[in-house]
Image (cartoon, rainbow, N blue to C red):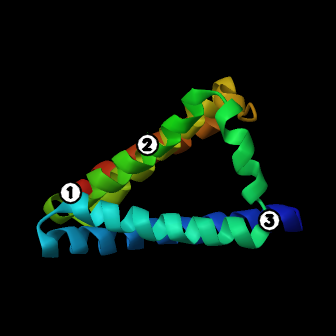
Amino acid sequence: MSAEALRYGAIMVAAGVGIPILAALNARLGALIAAPAAAAVVLFAVAFGGAVVVMLLTGSATAMAQIAQQPKHLFLAGFFVCFYVLSVTWVAPRFGLGNAISCVLLGQLVAAAVIDQFGLMGAMVRQITPLRATGLGLMALGVVLVQRG
């Protein structure tokens, strides 16, 4: 494995570690104020501020001028992150964080495999081989075991 692949992998593992932390923190905030949607608004406000700071520090603010010319379906990504944050903020306190995140992980792996299989949305094509399919099946089994545990 190349140094670049290791670096990318480490970044994504860190992002993966952040997902359940994000979910736990926001679910707790939503439960404490009895308003998951309000907690999500706070999360997005903080995230927006952070993204603006990074955009300004990296000099990519000029790219904003190109946004209006991009395919509008690409903006659906905002809907999906909103759906994730709202759903995990509402579900995690009722279903358990481990249960919620294990289901999220299974959904992510299945969706990523389908996107890779067909190269959807410009993704690199990576076939679902029997080995990958076995891995997905084991992940699904893992979710069932986590639910029963």
Local packing at callout 1 (Cα closer than 10 Å; few below 14, some 14-19, many 20+) is many
* Residue at figure coordinates x 25%, y 68% from the top left: 27
Local packing at callout 3 (Cα closer than 10 Å; few below 14, some 14-19, many 20+) is few
- Classify residue 14 by image quadrant: bottom right
The answer to which of 131 and 22 lies nearer the viewer is: 22
Question: Which residue is under mark 2?
Answer: 80
Residue 146 location in percent, x, y? 29, 58
* Residue at figure coordinates x 51%, y 41% from the top left: 77
Question: Tag on residue 130?
Answer: none
Location of the N terminus (image quadrant)? bottom right
First of labels 3, 2 by sequence position: 3
Left or right for 21, reference 149: right
Q: Amino acid at mark 3?
A: Gly
Question: Which residue is under mark 3?
Answer: 59
Q: Amino acid at mark 2?
A: Phe
- The alpha-carbon separation of the residues under discs 3 and 2 comes to 27 Å
- Classify residue 113 by image quadrant: top right
Q: Secondary structure at mark 1?
A: helix
- The alpha-carbon separation of the residues under discs 1 and 2 comes to 15 Å
Q: Secondary structure at mark 2?
A: helix
Location of the C terminus (image quadrant)? bottom left
